[in-house]
Image: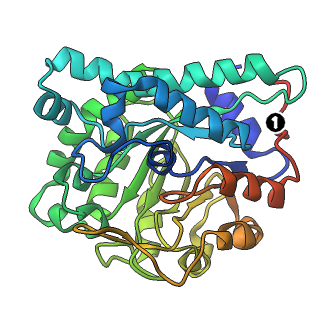
Amino acid sequence: MDSSARLRLYMNDNGPLILDGGLATELEAQGAKLQGDPLWSARLLHTNPQAIKDAHSRFLISGADVITSATYQASIPGFISHLDVSPERARDLLMSGVQLAKETVERFVLDTRPTGQRWPLVAGSVGPYGAFLLNGAEYTGAYAEEMSIEELKIWHRPQVDCVTAAGADLIAFETIPSIKEAEALVELLKEFPNSKAWLSFSCKDGKCISDGSLFTDAVRVANRSTQLVAVGVNCCSAALVEPLLDSARSLLGPDMSWVVYPNSGEDWDTKHGWLTSGNTSASISKLSRTWMKQGAALIGGCCRIGPAHIAELRQELKGSCTSAASAV
């Protein structure tokens, strides 16, 4: 059974797919020094790939049905610039993010299939152009005002090509802050007709994505694609999810689901990192049933959400670490 068929089966089988949490969060918890690194967790594709596999493994053990590759902040220009490697080596490194995730899944299935019988999926992460700028622009989208849709497509094309060529089960277009960038990604996806994807936005409040556009308009852009299986939000406070989904509830078509993976509720500051707020990560598991009732078929966590939080989420929604999508 190919990945597209497995994806359709999983999403229609006994509740939502459980996504993983913040990969960089888990890497930092295990001692990686990522703050201020222009490549963030993608640097470890070059320096410590085993650490990435170990982090993926902990999320799988905690009950994730989908793990996301360490390629959010990876790009061929970024690798060339910050690692002083050739374009060919940069491409290999980017592809290795998906390959490491696939190898971890295969090892996990080999170790657990007699009892758990889960075969998790691998999402190839493609972050926004703003992540390359290293100035927090993925939370404003201001750069899109100065770029054309074609320029954004040119930027994203090599990354999408790499994650698809490496065999990702689907593409995760994530933390997208602007309508224009979403339009570019929807157009670009057509160049990869055998690929499925989700599209998730960074949001500033309960009605708008980060560039100030209405979330309803962002969903309308997503609806133009027959290859997107889900649209939604990530790396925002969990408290914003319900009003955002509610604002666009009439726009969710029969072949589209919500994807939801908020952060811990803390705020990101480009100078000081994550700043503590009054929200807590526990709200993700508490609110997850509401999101499921709203139509969310993929639910997980983003920054500052670790394996323990994903285990709590799975317990809340499915009662165990055994996937309903078994024997596939």
Q: Residue furthest front?
A: 31
Q: Is residue 67 visible?
A: yes
The amino acid on which the numbered mark 1 sits, given as a three-letter code, is: Ala
Front-most of residues 220 and 238: 238
Tally the numbered discs.
1
42 to 257, vertically: above or below: above
Classify mark 1: residues with Cα within 10 Å, few (<14), some (14-19) or many (20+): many
Q: Residue at x 26, y 34 (%)?
A: 157
- Residue marked by disc 1: 325
Residue 150 in the image: state x and y as whole percent.
Answer: 17, 46
Q: Residue at x 88, y 53 (%)?
A: 319
The color scheme shown is rainbow
Residue 193 in the image: state x and y as whole percent.
Answer: 44, 30
Q: Quadrant of the N terminus?
A: top right
- SS category of the residue bearing label 1: loop
150 to 254, vertically: above or below: above
Q: Quadrant of the C terminus?
A: top right
Residue 234 in the image: state x and y as whole percent.
Answer: 49, 61
255 left or right of 264 in image: right
Front-most of residues 6 and 313: 313
Q: Is residue 2 visible?
A: no
Front-most of residues 28 and 201: 28
45 left or right of 215 in image: left
Residue 2 in the image: state x and y as whole percent.
Answer: 65, 21
Q: Residue at x 72, y 45 (%)?
A: 11
85 to 216, vertically: above or below: above
